[in-house]
Image (cartoon, rainbow, N blue to C red):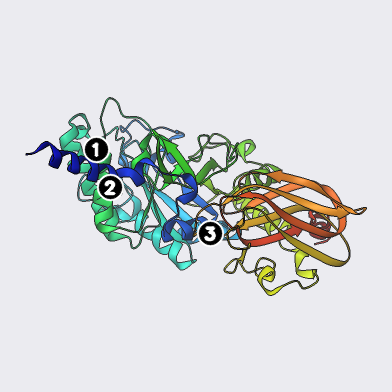
Amino acid sequence: MPSSHILRCLLSVLVAIAPALGQNAVDLKPTPQQVEWQDLEMGAIIHFGPNTFMDREWGDGTADPKVFNPTQFDPDQWMQALRAAGIRYVIFVAKHHDGFCLWPTAQTDYGVKSSPFENGRGDVVGKVEAAARKYGMKFGVYLSPWDRHEPRYSNSAEYDKYYTAELDELAQGYGQLEEFWLDGAGSGGHVYNFPRIVEELRMWQPNTLVFADMALFEYGDIRWVGNEDGVIPYENWNVIDRHGYLRWRPVEADTPLRKNHWFWHPNDEASLKSLPELMTMYEQTVGRGGQLVLGIAPDRRGLIPEADVQRLKEFGEAVRSRYGTNLVTKHLVTGAEEELALDGDPDTFWSAPAGSHHAALDVRFDHPVTFDRALTMEWLNSGQRVQLYAIEVFREGKWSAVARGQAIGHKRIDPFAPVTASRVRLHILSSSAEAHIREFQIFNSNEASAESRKK
């Protein structure tokens, strides 16, 4: 082949890959599935199995299936409790690291079909899925790659066949899966074939979002926050960088409702997280543009304990109380475009002037109002654009900031000392392109707390 032709071929290849080499975070956009998922905001991951009956967190795969025998199994009760908390999607642990399968899989006898539960004919996954859909919740599954029971685990090729066959059953038998939770815990020297796992899932569930930690960069649609505290401890950007390659991967912050315990344990009342702890977690996860996923643990009866049900109810009521009275609704009417961010409808958005890199959304009242929190939502369909912003009030003839931040993303909650003013604005100090704001709201948490106490 002539050298000139070789050169032309090389140049054409470089031109083709140039966009990938020149990736910029501000150019990346979410998929429609990611946008929908981010709007869910709160989920639950439910752990239930032999560990529940053996006072364990990590099973070793030797438990007799006969230990699994809930006598009052009622997933409807679970969903009622979760819905009261404002939770909108459920991830059910279909198989944990012990290898015990909570659906009647054809791949092994180690599971519910060898237990006394419903005389070996029960399908826990199926009943949880049906209950979730009955109460209007999205449903997803966790299928542990690590399996401490299955003998084939020591043979990577054979175990991969076994695992993907299990995945096929879940992906084909339980409707549309919102999320597939791909845990990286454990391995025992086994090298997982993650490309094959995700390809198998995609064959049956092309719209399912894959949760995975940062190490599984190219296989995930959602990323782990990096802790189990239910806190996003950083400015939260949806686009992440690994080895110079960028992806839109919003963050999920998972934490158990009971401290350090994913499974139920007896005599464990003191571990239940307090309402103030849950509210702080909400504001530092959902309020920082991520998802809060609470770990829920049914007990040996197959019910969520009464104390947990009550705490979930209190949590939902507290969120609705604190963020239920948006003071912006009492503002003086502004321009038609600006009203799209002040109308309480997240399906509409205000667009700053085309081509702008800074702008302000000014809200006026006919009398001074007192508030201590601002809630801002960015319309992300065109990407995350806001890079620096301030919440400012107009007093004594000048604007002063009560809060500042960099990322807004899906939702940003800014708490600050109570302030009284008749004008407040969202000041976009820097954006990669014109800002798109779905909602700008303000709240008085002290007033909400007083109203709640009256009830």
**In-image side of 337 versus 409 (left or right):** right
Q: Which residue is mark 2?
A: 16
Q: Which residue is mark 3?
A: 39
Report helix, strand or loop for mark 3. Answer: helix
In the image shown, does 67 or 13 lie closer to the viewer? Answer: 13
In which quadrant is the C terminus drawn?
A: bottom right
- Upstream in sequence: badge 2 or badge 1: 2
Q: Position of residue 430 (x, y in %)?
A: 64, 48
Residue 206 vs 16, above or below: the answer is below
The type of residue carrying mark 2 is Ala
Q: Position of residue 171 (x, y in %)?
A: 29, 56
Residue at (24% x, 42% y) in the render: 11
Could you say which disc has been placed on residue 193 in the image?
A: 1
**In-image side of 121 versus 340 (left or right):** left
Task: Note whether residue 404 is visible.
Answer: yes
The type of residue carrying mark 3 is Asp
Instruction: Tell me if mark 3 has few (under 14), some (14-19) or many (20+) residues whose alpha carbon lies within 10 angstroms of its own.
Output: some
- Upstream in sequence: badge 3 or badge 2: 2
Residue 100 vs 439, above or below: the answer is above
Q: Are marks 3 and 1 in contact (CB under 8 Å)?
A: no
The type of residue carrying mark 1 is Asn
**Count of numbered circles in the view:** 3
Q: Quadrant of residue 61?
A: top left
Q: Nearer the viewer, mark 2 or mark 1?
A: 2
Report helix, strand or loop for mark 1. Answer: loop
Q: CA distance from mark 3 to mark 1?
A: 31 Å
Q: Position of residue 23 (x, y in %)?
A: 41, 44
Q: Nearer the viewer, mark 3 or mark 2?
A: 2
In the image shown, does 131 or 72 lie closer to the viewer? Answer: 131
